[in-house]
Image: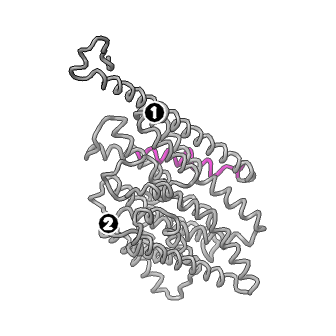
């Protein structure tokens, strides 16, 4: 689940405030929400019975991502030409998201080749290819995977479905916003027209989400059109200005309580996303309202260093935790129980910290790539093609081996049919399996 929001937030300006102090407060607040979201997802995946609705942390990330990306667009689009803005915008997304994301995919491929039987290679190879192309959510929808069913054999990269939704959103959303702002400027009401466009997308996507959840619930969980409304609902918060101090203080607390309660009450028995997804989405939007020209009303809750650290590593933690959960039992030949889960969680936190420090941060701060968007695109393309080529080779090699083994078995079975029972006593009959 979806945790790309830390990367986005690093680029985003505080709404209606440009002071360094305000920016620091914004980061602390967003990190607190992010820590809540990733904590819920990780606990759910390690101990699903303890937090049956922890999967809604992904929905929290969706809303926060929409808020941050739209805040960034509103603050930056007027400073550049449209072409320059879009090229730099997408280049930043590549620098922020691909290094850690592709590193985890490479790890999965290597671990699969070293430790898993070849019968599992084709499936994992296929999922890695779709993940590299930002289409994992559509593959899972096509396969009608029940994400919330614990009895399903999981793919070590299926958690990339939420990242695929966000990455698809990052492609088309800037185009929509630029077009809406351009039309609005011609009418002298740029922000109003843009806000209306966002509201229209939100209503349309939510309506489709309700319909799809009822008629095709397995696919509805994953596909982008049923999830866009959650990102665009967060986007709407970038346009909202609350005049009431009491409302700015109270609403974040109400939103926080809504999300926390939802982590316990919203479970896999409810049709999802549908109406149930309003709980984390609206709750997060209410928290985001508190990010307006003042300290977050529960800043003391989000500012402790452990919470900030969890927010820092949240993207890497989201990326690494699921493959480790899936692969550890196979690699170590163990059952994940109490002590084993605690040790694996500790190892996951350490790996996530190292990933944040030595992969995410250098890529994000690289001035070489920041000054040369073309180099960012070229490097990203080469890296993606390398992952796709490796996964395709793994898929093809294993599939060929499996077909050869099956053909050999079929041939031996045919020979055995002629030398079975009493006929095996005939001269010339040999044991076909010797």
Residue 329 drawn at (x, y percent):
33, 40
Quadrant housing residue 283: bottom left
Q: Which mark is residue 45?
A: none
Which secondary structure type mostly characterizes the magenta part of the structure? helix
Name the image quarter holding the C terminus.
top left
**Crowding near the residue tagged with mark 2, few <14, some 14–19, many ≥20 C-alpha atoms within 10 Å:** many
Q: Nearer the viewer, residue 388 or 244?
A: 388
Badge 1 marks a residue whose secondary structure is: helix
Give the residue drawn at x 61%, y 45%: 384
User: Please, which colouring scheme is shown?
Assistant: one colour
Identify the residue position indicated by label 2 in the image: 267
Badge 2 marks a residue whose secondary structure is: loop
Residue 163 drawn at (x, y percent):
52, 57
Q: Is residue 5 visible?
A: no
List the single residue furthest toward the bottom. 244
Residue 144 forms part of the magenta stretch: no
Q: Is residue 104 left or right of residue 188?
A: left
Q: Is residue 182 above or below residue 48?
A: below
Q: Nearer the viewer, mark 1 or mark 2?
A: 1
Residue 213 drawn at (x, y percent):
41, 70
Please report the bounds of the magenta region as a residue range: 348-369
Q: Is residue 383 visible?
A: yes
Identify the residue position indicated by label 1 in the image: 403
Distance from the alpha carbon under mark 1 to that under mark 2: 41 Å
Whether label 1 touches label 2, CB < 8 Å: no
Residue 48 drawn at (x, y percent):
30, 57
Q: Is residue 433 above or below residue 319?
A: above
Q: Is residue 336 above or below residue 285?
A: above
């Amino acid at each position: 689940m979806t945790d790309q929001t830390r990367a986005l937030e690093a680029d985003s300006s505080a709404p209606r405030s440009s002071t360094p102090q305000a920016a620091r407060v914004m980061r602390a607040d967003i990190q607190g929400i992010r820590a809540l979201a990733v904590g819920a997802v990780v606990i759910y995946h390690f101990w699903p019975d303890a937090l049956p609705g922890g999967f809604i942390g992904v929905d929290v990330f969706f809303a926060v991502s929409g808020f941050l990306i739209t805040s960034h667009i509103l603050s930056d689009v007027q400073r550049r030409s449209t072409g320059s803005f879009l090229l730099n915008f997408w280049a930043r997304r590549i620098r922020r998201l691909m290094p850690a994301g592709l590193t985890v995919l490479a790890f999965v491929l290597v671990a699969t080749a070293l430790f898993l039987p070849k019968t599992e290679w084709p499936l994992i190879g296929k999922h890695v290819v779709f993940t590299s192309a930002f289409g994992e959510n559509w593959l899972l929808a096509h396969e009608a995977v029940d994400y919330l069913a614990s009895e399903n054999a999981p793919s070590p990269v299926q958690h990339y479905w939420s990242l695929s939704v966000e990455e698809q959103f990052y492609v088309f959303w800037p185009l929509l916003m630029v077009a809406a702002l351009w039309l609005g400027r011609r009418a002298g009401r740029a922000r109003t027209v843009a806000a209306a466009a966002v509201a229209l997308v939100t209503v349309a996507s939510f309506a489709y989400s309700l319909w799809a959840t009822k008629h095709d619930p397995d696919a509805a969980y994953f596909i982008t059109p049923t999830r866009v409304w959650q990102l665009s609902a967060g986007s709407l918060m970038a346009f909202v200005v609350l005049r009431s101090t009491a409302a700015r203080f109270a609403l974040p607390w109400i939103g926080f309580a809504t999300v926390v309660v939802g982590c316990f009450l919203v479970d896999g028995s409810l049709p999802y996303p549908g109406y149930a997804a309003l709980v984390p989405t609206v709750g997060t939007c209410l928290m985001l309202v508190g990010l307006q020209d003042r300290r977050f009303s529960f800043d003391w809750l989000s500012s402790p260093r452990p919470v900030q650290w969890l927010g820092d590593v949240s993207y890497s933690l989201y990326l690494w935790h699921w493959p480790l959960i899936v692969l550890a039992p196979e690699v170590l030949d163990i059952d994940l129980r109490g002590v084993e889960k605690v040790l694996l969680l500790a190892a996951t936190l350490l790996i996530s910290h190292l990933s944040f420090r030595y992969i995410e941060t250098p890529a994000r701060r690289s001035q070489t790539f920041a000054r040369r968007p073309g180099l960012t695109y070229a490097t990203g393309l080469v890296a993606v093609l390398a992952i796709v080529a490796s996964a395709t080779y793994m898929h093809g090699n294993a599939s060929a081996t499996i077909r050869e083994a099956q053909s050999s078995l079929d041939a031996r079975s045919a020979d055995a049919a002629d030398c079975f029972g009493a006929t095996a006593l005939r001269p010339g009959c040999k044991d076909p399996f010797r």
